[in-house]
C-alpha cells in the first residue's frame, strides 16, 4: 500500500509495523504524514520501524513530526526504530535528541561513534 502526501510517499511494508518514507518531509507534508504515522502507532504493537533511506528532512516542522511520533509511540508502549538514516538526517536527529529515546540505525555503520553506540544501548534498554 502506498500513501502520497504531496512531496512525500509512505510505503506500508507491514501495516502498523514497518513503513518506508520517501521524499521531502517539510511543513507542507507534516499534517498528512503525522496523521498516517499516528495511525500506524494505533494499528500495531511492539516496534514501529520507519525506513528513512530516501527521506529528506527539510525544516523544523518536518523534524518535529518525527519527534512527536517518537513521543506518541512511547506513550502507547511502543518503540520507534529509524533505519537506513542518511548522514544529514542523522545529524538533525542528534540535535533534536531523537537518538536518545529511539533506536536509530544509520545507512552506513561507519557513521556511528562509540558515544552513539552507548546511546543506542541506553535507548534499547529503556524500551525494554
Image (tube, rainbow, N blue to C red):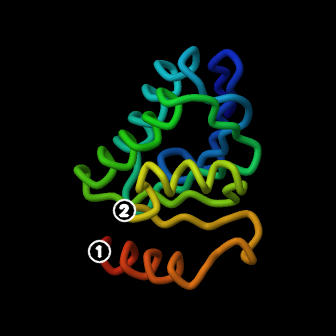
Task: Examine the image and state in which quarter residue 68 appears.
Answer: top left
What count of labels does the image hold?
A: 2
Mark 2, secondary structure of its residue: helix
The residue singled out by tag 1 in the image is: 126
Determine contact: label 1, label 2, CB under 8 Å.
yes
The residue singled out by tag 2 in the image is: 101
Task: Examine the image and state in which quarter residue 82 appears.
Answer: bottom right
Residue sticking out furthest to the left: 75
The residues bearing labels 1 and 2 have C-alpha atoms spaced at a distance of 8 Å
- Relative horizontal placement of residue 54, taking residue 41 as reference (left or right): right
Q: Considering only vertical position in the picture, is 6 above or below 98?
A: above
Mark 1, secondary structure of its residue: helix
Query: Which residue occupies the foreground of this view, 101 or 16?
Result: 101
Q: What residue sits 69% from the left and 28% below the top?
A: 24
Query: Which residue occupies the foreground of this view, 31 or 76?
Result: 31
Q: What residue sits 30% from the left and 44% below the top?
A: 72
Amino acid at each position: 500500500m502506498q500513501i502520497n502526501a504531496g512531496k512525500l510517499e509512505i510505503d506500508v511494508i507491514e501495516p502498523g509495523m514497518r513503513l518506508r518514507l520517501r521524499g521531502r518531509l517539510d511543513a507542507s507534508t507534516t499534517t498528512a504524514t503525522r496523521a498516517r504515522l499516528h495511525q500506524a502507532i494505533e494499528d500495531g504493537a511492539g516496534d514501529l520501524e520507519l525506513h528513512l533511506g530516501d527521506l529528506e528532512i527539510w525544516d523544523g516542522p518536518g523534524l518535529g513530526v518525527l519527534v512527536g511520533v517518537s513521543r506518541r509511540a512511547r506513550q502507547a508502549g511502543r518503540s520507534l526504530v529509524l533505519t537506513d538514516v542518511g548522514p544529514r538526517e542523522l545529524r538533525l536527529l542528534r540535535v533534536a535528541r531523537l537518538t536518545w529515546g529511539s533506536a536509530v540505525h544509520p545507512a552506513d555503520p561507519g557513521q556511528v561513534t562509540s558515544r552513539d553506540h552507548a546511546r543506542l544501548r541506553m535507548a534499547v534498554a529503556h524500551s525494554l
